[in-house]
Image (cartoon, grey):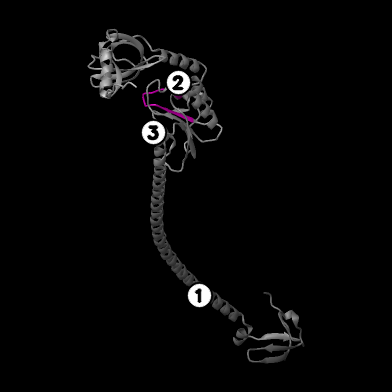
Amino acid sequence: MNERQLVTVTEFCTVIKRIFQAEEMLKNIAIVGEISGFRASGAHSYFSLKDSGAILPCSCFNYKKTYVPKEGEKVIVVGSPDYYVQGGRFSFIVSQIEPQGIGLLYQKIEELKKKLADEGIFDAAHKKPIPKFPKNVIVVTSKSGAVIRDICRTIRKYNDNIDIVVKDVKVQGEFAAREITSALYAVDKLGYDCCILARGGGSLEDLMPFYDEKVVRAVYDMKTPIISAIGHETDFSLCDFAADARSATPTAAAELIAYDVREYKKNVFDFLSRGKFATVKHLGNAENRTKLLAQKVGSGMEKLYRDDFARLKLLLNRMKNAENTIIKTKEYQINKSINSLDNLNPTRILKSGYFRVYSDNLPVLSVENVKTGDDISLKGADGRIFATVTGVEKENV
């Protein structure tokens, strides 16, 4: 068996690098493709150039930025391939970039967006309100990514009473769209209060499952309120337009549904404190008003008592005076009546020397009541006189 020639990794990678450098046809070659994942770092830029069949990593050093490409834009780049020996990475070193119009992927996305918009898939009237106080939430995402950890941590931070369920799906790659579509229709039947469709940031090709027509229609068909949280703040997928609500990041989606129990507790405490203070203040005011009223009533009652007592005393005096006056008047009237009666007393008259004449024990009121020869009696103050009438003489009065 022939002994094989052994080379080191460095030797092998160096050979590859030399092949790239020696091949004339690979120098200053022009390639057309779509920009993906463009990022700048100082004077350098890094991105991928892609088409429907392949992806080419590109680097641009010390490029005079007379033109800055946009994500998904179709461009022509001029440069040469290179191999970075220490890192073991292949890259196309770009010396020139020229635009070639809107990229094919973006064009297809815009066409699909217009189609769905015309069908009313993005209409605001179709959107459901996101529950303010959900008891549970299901998150459709990859359980192995940082996204679900961020969502769970954020929800637990504000409210640990919300149950979180994860529906694990692929969020990029060839079968991701089909898996996400099936998952959405499945979880919609489970009766959760809310659903979050989430994925972290990435290039356009990484986010392509969320531009898939079937995925977008599944989002639209959801009876469960759904929040789209795809990529970073600057990323907008078609699912964002079809969902009931869109969050700039998965963390923001968690904050949207995780009502802050601490804040509510603080608000309730503040409300009760304000109510207690107002009640105490009200009771204090009422107590002060009651004391003031009691003072007023007390002073008023005292004054009223003094006034009534004075009026009663005056009335008693008046009654006493009136009584004395009445008594004296009655005494005078009685004495006058007594005197009058006394003056009319026959006995008193008789004491004055007068006699009362009786005939047959009847008083003689007129000379016509007797005749000559009648026996009569004369009653005086101290006795009677018996006599016989010897004559009667009538006088004209």
Residue 187 spot, x, y in % from top left: 53, 32
Amino acid type, label 1: Lys
Q: Residue at x 40, y 47 (%)?
A: 269
Residue 78: x and y, percent? 29, 10
Closer-to-camera residue (284/60): 60
Q: From the viewer's perspective, is residue 363 above or below residue 225? A: below
* Image position of 340 (left or right of 370): left
- Asked if disc 3 and disc 1 are in contact, CB closer than 8 Å, the reply is no
Residue 325 or 301: which is nearer the viewer? 301
Tag 1, which secondary structure?
helix
SS for dot 2: helix
Instruction: Give the amino acid type for the residue marked by disc 2 in the picture.
Output: Tyr
The furthest residue to the front: 1
Q: Which residue is mark 3?
A: 146
Looking at the rendered image, the quarter that the N terminus falls into is top left
Work out whether mark 2 precedes mark 3 in sequence or the reverse, and give the earlier one: 3
**Residue range corresponding to the magenta coloring:** 226-239
Marks 2 and 3 sit apart, C-alpha to C-alpha, by 22 Å
Is disc 2 in contact with disc 1, using a CB cutoff of under 8 Å?
no
Badge 3 crowding class, 10 Å Cα cut-off, few under 14, some 14 to 19, many 20 or more, is: few
Tell me the residue that label 2 is attached to: 211
Q: Is residue 84 shown left or right of residue 315?
A: left
